[in-house]
Amino acid sequence: MSPVVKIVQPSGILDGMKAGQFRQEISDIVENGADIVLIDFKDVTFMDSSGLGALVLALKTVRASGGKLFICSINEQVKMLFELTSMDRVFEIFPNRDEFYNQVTS
């Protein structure tokens, strides 16, 4: 049986205002049986430390349920934030959705 892949696509600014909503979306997806969660950052223009915190909690939530979390399509600002906080070593990041599908689901 192939794994259940769910995609979350936040948009705009991922900060403290949106962090709670983002965490809830991840929790709902996990409760509904997703094995793999892909967070597509293609429409995210900016992320601050609150957004990063929400992402770390999302990772813990997904892992606690036995699932995996991946990220794709990050912009330069988000990439820099990940590198400065060493989160680029914690998260598996793909350049885009196609690369994710080629490497993870094949």
Image: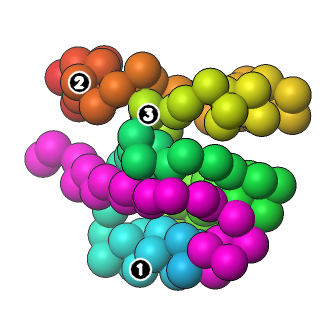
Q: Report whether residue 44 is seen.
A: yes
Q: Which residue is mark 1?
A: 28
The x and y percentages for residue 44 are 50, 49
What is the three-letter code of the residue carrying label 2?
Asp
Q: Which residue is mark 3?
A: 72
Helix, strand or loop at label 1? It is: helix
The x and y percentages for residue 57 are 70, 63
Instruction: Give me the residue at 45% from left, 59% from top.
Output: 10
Label 3 Cα neighbours within 10 Å, binned few <14 / some 14-19 / many ≥20 = many
On screen, residue 105 above or below 29? above
Instruction: Give me the residue at 37% from left, 71% from top.
Output: 29
Q: Which residue is mark 2?
A: 98
Helix, strand or loop at label 2? It is: helix
The x and y percentages for residue 100 are 32, 27
**Range drawn in magenta:** 1-20
**Magenta includes 43?**
no
The answer to whether the residues at label 3 and label 1 have Cβ atoms under 8 Å apart is: no
The answer to whether the residues at label 2 and label 1 have Cβ atoms under 8 Å apart is: no
Write down the quadrant of residue 92 in the picture.
Answer: top right
